[in-house]
Image (cartoon, grey):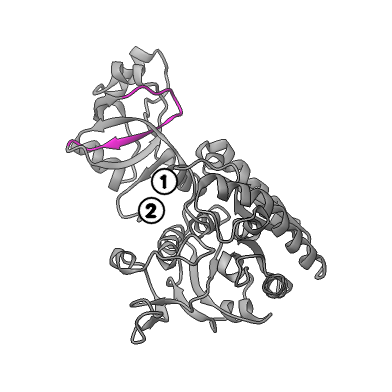
């Protein structure tokens, strides 16, 4: 079997008991399955939910809290319990674990995004099992991943994983909700995730989870666009993950071979960076940068919107105002106001530099055309 880099996402419903507390027996089974996956030589990253579900009963809640402060307090209690339980289980198999708690804020700045990737790469190089969760106890509403399904997709792209396994309590993606419609048909394989499938999929989650199948399908669409194949489904026993990797899983496989990966710099631009302004370009420049792989030059710029500094990210729009992509600029908004529409020779005179006047280099550009992310 070819060795792979695999991200495994385990949801709250796969970790908790009927009362919503952490189920040690379920966690131990997951630990055994992950250990066997590593024993076969695969590199494994675990994205695990369960902190809120594990902690809310100790706060005196009878069910999972719905308020932000309640969930954050529960996560503060439950995250320690969750990691301790995982560490104890993996120690039985001679596996050292590491914890990474991420928020959207950690990935907005390019250097922080790169640091997260470098940390994960070093842990994998040292044969450590990273356990990742969203830092629910301090995350800010509006700057969250939404749920750990999307977090697992973004982590898959960050580490250039070949496969993302999303374990859930439903064995795959169905044409309708199988719990309410016994005639719903399961998709055993999908080459892609059409937008229509996302629209038709239920967003209803469990009493201890936040996602539902809709969030898993959305995550699969993102992971696929980043070059990762996906499995969504269920399984039991210590060999369940090996069965999934070998193509014998009980669920839905998504993605054809081969799948092109997206460079990390492009991922950051597309999915994490914050635009600080806009640049409007003419039709010729729009075609050159979005379809011909060219860099953006001053001559193609018609208007500047907002205030930004050099190396910040901006959106680029065509004459109709449609966003065609985003990139890191080499000039501030004030400098671009002076050189917009000028040929490179004239721009060099104004900026008093002998360098070629590239506003956005193609290596620092992400085009929206046909990317799907």
**Pointers 1 and 2 in contact (C-beta within 8 Å):** yes
Q: Residue 366, image x and y in percent?
A: 38, 44
- Residue 133 or 337: which is nearer the viewer? 133
Q: Could you say whether the residue bearing mark 1 is in a helix, strand or loop?
A: helix
Q: Residue 124, image x and y in percent?
A: 70, 57
Q: Which part of the image, by quadrant, shows the N terminus?
A: bottom right
Q: Is residue 340 left or right of residue 193?
A: left
Number of marks in picture: 2
Residue at image coords 66%, 81%: 239
Task: Quote the CA–CA distance across marks 1 and 2.
Answer: 7 Å
Name, please, the residue furthest toward the bottom: 183
* Tag of residue 373: 2
Asked if residue 267 is positioned above or below residue 63 in the image, the reply reads: above
Q: Is residue 236 magenta?
A: no
Q: Quadrant of residue 116?
A: top right
Q: Which numbered disc flags the more N-terminal residue, 1 or 2?
A: 1
């Amino acid at each position: 079997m070819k060795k792979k880099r695999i991200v495994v996402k385990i949801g709250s419903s796969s970790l908790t008991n009927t009362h919503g507390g952490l189920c040690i027996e379920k966690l131990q089974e997951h630990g055994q399955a992950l250990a066997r996956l590593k024993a076969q030589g695969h590199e494994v990253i675990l994205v695990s939910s369960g902190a809120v579900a594990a902690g809310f009963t100790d706060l005196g809640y009878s069910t999972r809290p719905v308020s932000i402060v309640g969930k954050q307090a529960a996560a503060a209690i439950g995250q320690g319990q969750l990691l301790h339980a995982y560490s104890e289980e993996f120690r039985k198999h001679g596996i050292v674990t590491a914890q990474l708690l991420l928020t959207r804020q950690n990935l907005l700045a390019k250097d922080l995004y790169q640091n997260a990737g470098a940390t994960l790469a070093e842990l994998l190089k040292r044969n450590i099992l990273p356990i990742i969760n969203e830092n629910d106890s301090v995350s800010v509403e509006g700057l969250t991943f939404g749920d750990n399904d999307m977090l697992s997709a973004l982590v898959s792209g960050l580490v250039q994983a070949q496969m993302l396994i999303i374990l859930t309590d439903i064995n795959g993606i169905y044409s309708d909700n199988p719990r309410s419609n016994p005639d719903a048909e399961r998709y055993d394989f999908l080459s892609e995730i059409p937008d229509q499938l996302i629209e038709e999929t239920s967003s209803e989650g469990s009493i201890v989870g936040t996602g539902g199948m809709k969030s898993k399908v959305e995550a699969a669409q993102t992971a696929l666009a980043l070059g990762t194949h996906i499995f969504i489904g269920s399984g039991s026993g210590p060999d369940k993950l090996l069965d999934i990797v070998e193509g014998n899983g009980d669920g839905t496989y998504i993605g054809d071979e081969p799948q092109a990966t997206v460079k990390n710099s492009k991922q950051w631009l597309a999915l994490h960076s914050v635009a600080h302004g806009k640049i409007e370009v003419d039709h010729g420049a729009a075609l050159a940068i979005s379809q011909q792989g060219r860099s953006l030059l001053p001559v193609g710029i018609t208007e500047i919107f907002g205030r930004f500094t050099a190396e910040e990210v901006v959106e680029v729009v065509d004459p109709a105002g449609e966003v065609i992509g985003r990139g890191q600029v080499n000039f501030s908004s004030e400098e671009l106001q002076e050189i917009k529409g000028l040929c490179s020779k004239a721009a060099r005179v104004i900026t008093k530099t002998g360098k070629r006047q590239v506003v956005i280099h193609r290596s620092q550009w992400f085009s929206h055309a046909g990317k799907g992310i």
